[in-house]
Image (cartoon, coloured by chain):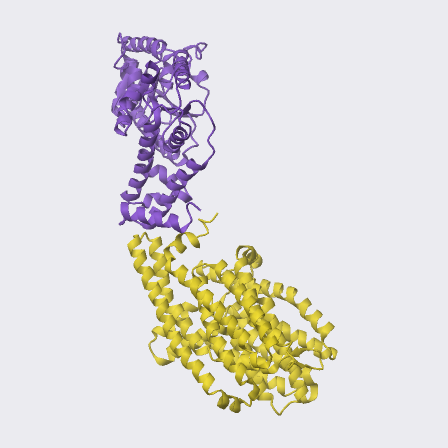
Chain colours: A purple, B yellow
Amino acid sequence: MLLNSPAAWDLLVRMYERCQPDSSFLEYFWGWRALVGGLYSTLLCPLPKARVYHTICTGYVGLFAARARVETGRPVLLTEHGIYTNERRIEIAMADWLEERPAAELSIERRGPDIRDLWVSTFLADSKVCYEASSRIITLYEGNQMLQEADGAARDRMTVIPNGIDCAHFAGVKREKQPRPTMALIGRVVPIKDVKCYIRAAAILRETIPELHALVMGPTDEDKTYFAECAEMVRYLGLENTVEFTGRVNLKDWLGRLDVVVLTSISEAQPLVILEAGSLGIPTVSTDVGACREMIHGSTTEDPPLGPAGVITPLSNPSATAAGVARLLTDPDFYEACGRAVRARLEKYYNKRDLDQAYGEIYRFYAAVDDNVPPGTENLQRAA
Amino acid sequence: MAGIGFVLRKLVNRDDLLGVMTGYGHSAVAAAGPWLITIIALVSISQFSAGRVEPEDLASFRLITIYNFGFSLVLGSAITQVATRYLSDRIYCRDIRPAPGMLLAALALNGAAQLPLAAGFYFLVLNATAAVKAAAVVNYFVISMLWLVAIFLTALKAHRVITTAFAIGMTVACWASVTPAPWYGTAGMLMGFSGGVALIFFPLAARVFAEYRHRVERSWDFLPYFKRYWTLAASAFFYNTAIWVDKWILWLAPEREKLPIGLVSYPDYDSAMFLAYLSIIPSLSLFVLNIETRFFEDYRRFYGEIQRHATLAKVRVNHERLVECILESGRNFLVLQAACSAAAILFAPQLFDLMKVNAIQYGMFRLGVLGAAFHAMFLFLGILLSYFELNKLALRLNVLFLVTNALFSYLSLQGGLAWYGYGYLAACVTTFAVGFLVVARELNRLPYVAFIGANSSVRT
């Protein structure tokens, strides 16, 4: 009824004529239906009663939270790990990924820039609504806050609460020095992890460290085409004895054997693997994405500075990655310093126990707030 | 009308008079095929047999064939319609391999479904010799087979074979039904006629197997179509029932004839109506020609450009063009039909003299001509609806036609002789009026219909 009635059709036609009258109407039709259909289901599905609503992203979930705010007058908290709009942007831009989806989204690759604009601007609008409704906008690291601000979030409602790990979790794992220097990319074999960059870096490293062992630890079946391309690349570069795909593994069995952890992702939020490896004193070479810089170099507010816990490299730069790994593997003093720094930082800033407590306090505070206090003014309310 | 468009466009584009005329001929066959065959067969046999056959034998024969034509059209309509749709889809998908197998399976299904009915009816009801009963059943079977193979008519390339088969078969049917009459009576006439029909059926069937040289495979693949296109099957059934229901009801009139064999009819009404139907053939073929050529191109452009990512503005232009084309076809039809109807009504006395028809039929004939004109227009609305995949609307219109035709015919029956024929006319006018409003509404909002109203992937 909401999507199929003549009135809905008129709305669609009016929106099309306002926004992009020169683009494919067929694409607009299906795009509009997908987006507006999602909006309607968000607005129509049952809303559970709660003192505080906590959403873990913007998008449709964020819209739902905003609806909860409007309907119940209770505060909404937002914790964004990755920035939703950004991820949608990347998704829509990455034709590889789009081609992976059959049927419904098959046509997206043919979409002109117009229909992409529709998608992106819709998600952006969804985010704005969610930011507007949220009393606290929490994210994992400072870098994200700039993106949130650019998308319309109010600076005074923002907080950073990183993810932490349980420092004791890997306590039983012993470092076992392997006969070959060993580095590992721990993650799914998918384009967003840029495994190809890692393979190229391995090829460069082998020139100076011939006995290098480069592991790729993570499931290979999520994007079979991409995995096949990676395997092909390994063959092409003659790296069969250097690069090894282990598939999905139990990190506890493997972490102890690694010398360096490598991340070549083109997008991340706060990859915990840096901390997990760090808990054993293993340094990381990572691209400058998400919270990686903060975890490796410390945040701007770190006092006293604990020093680097590895190397940060530009995106899609195999030689920089190779250079970072080479430095760690050939400079024992630097290696030791990094190991110490990451352990100290982990204990001080990324301890799961402390961070859980932070959320507990936030929940207690907002659960006690009166109904219908405008978002962001709860502190004033309490003070008064 | 599977595939007729290609042929017609080719014929019309030949740009000579014969090509255009042939185009018209094929259109007529495509539009009214079985109907046309029925009427021509009945009229010509009546003309041909006059004075050569015992009146009682002729009457029995005539009535049995009328029953057979009528009931086989009605009872076979669902299978025929579904098979047609399946064949069209196969042609559209360029995968006609299952076609021969489907023909065999449809024939078998048709036989299994209808033969017991026909046999039961004739053996229980008919008051005649076993030979006549058997001949009647055979005749029914042959005719109902002809309807099935007729769906391939327009898809076949060999038009000369078709035309020849029909010409020879019909001639033989007339001759063979009349000649043995003095010795074998009704049974002889029926068998002779069946032989003639078989002479049409078998060459056509042979032609199908000759053109589709594929192993018999996936014969029963069309069965799911009964579920998928149940609206089409039901539509065809209701439509064909509606065409006959006024006759059936008038068979209850006080003026009806009850033959010694135990069947009833009202020959004056029946033949007045059959003759009246002939008046729409010219405009019918014109309309089909227009639809299948110009309209079809505009229609394809409209949907094709949507698929090729046209802007809405472009879609609207195509929409307007399509509507314009339909209006123009409608106008052409109206002019021609008005002329034909007027001529038929004005020259009815001369026509009836010529064909030696009972003058009591004037009134019914003239009402029939008027009704048929509306009937034809309603038929076109139905064709448009099916083009736009608005099958449920078509189904409802056909149900309306059936209900009004039955109701008004019954009322006219109560009114007496002077009112006979008004029932059919009123039903046709009503159905056309409603159909016109429906089609006008859907045509006006065609983009909506294309994207949502008739889009099965949107309606969940």
Quarter where residue B224 is shown:
bottom right
Quarter where residue B142 is shown:
bottom right
Residue found at x 38% / y 32%: A63
Q: In this view, does A166 lie to the left or right of A310?
A: right
| The one of A198 and A147 positioned closer to us in this rendering | A147
| The one of B155 and A232 positioned closer to us in this rendering | B155
Residue found at x 63% / y 88%: B179
Residue found at x 52% / y 82%: B365
Residue A224 rendering spot, x and y as whole percentages: 41, 35
Residue A314 rendering spot, x and y as whole percentages: 25, 24
In the rendered view, tell whether residue B212 sits above or below residue A310: below
Give the tally of numbered discs.
0
Work out which residue is located at the far front of the displayed protein and give it: A384
Q: Is residue A347 left or right of residue B28?
A: left
In the rendered view, tell whether residue B408 sits above or below residue B192: above
Residue B265 rendering spot, x and y as whole percentages: 64, 79
Residue A56 rendering spot, x and y as whole percentages: 39, 26
Can residue A291 be spotted in the picture?
no
Q: Is residue B414 left or right of residue A312?
A: right
Quarter where residue A147 is shown:
top left
| The one of B138 and A236 positioned closer to us in this rendering | B138
Residue found at x 70% / y 75%: B134
**Quarter of the image with the C terminus of chain A in it:** top left
In the rendered view, tell whether residue B227 sits above or below residue A316: below
Can residue B425 be spotted in the picture?
yes
| The one of B420 and A212 positioned closer to us in this rendering | B420
In the rendered view, tell whether residue A165 sits above or below residue A59: above
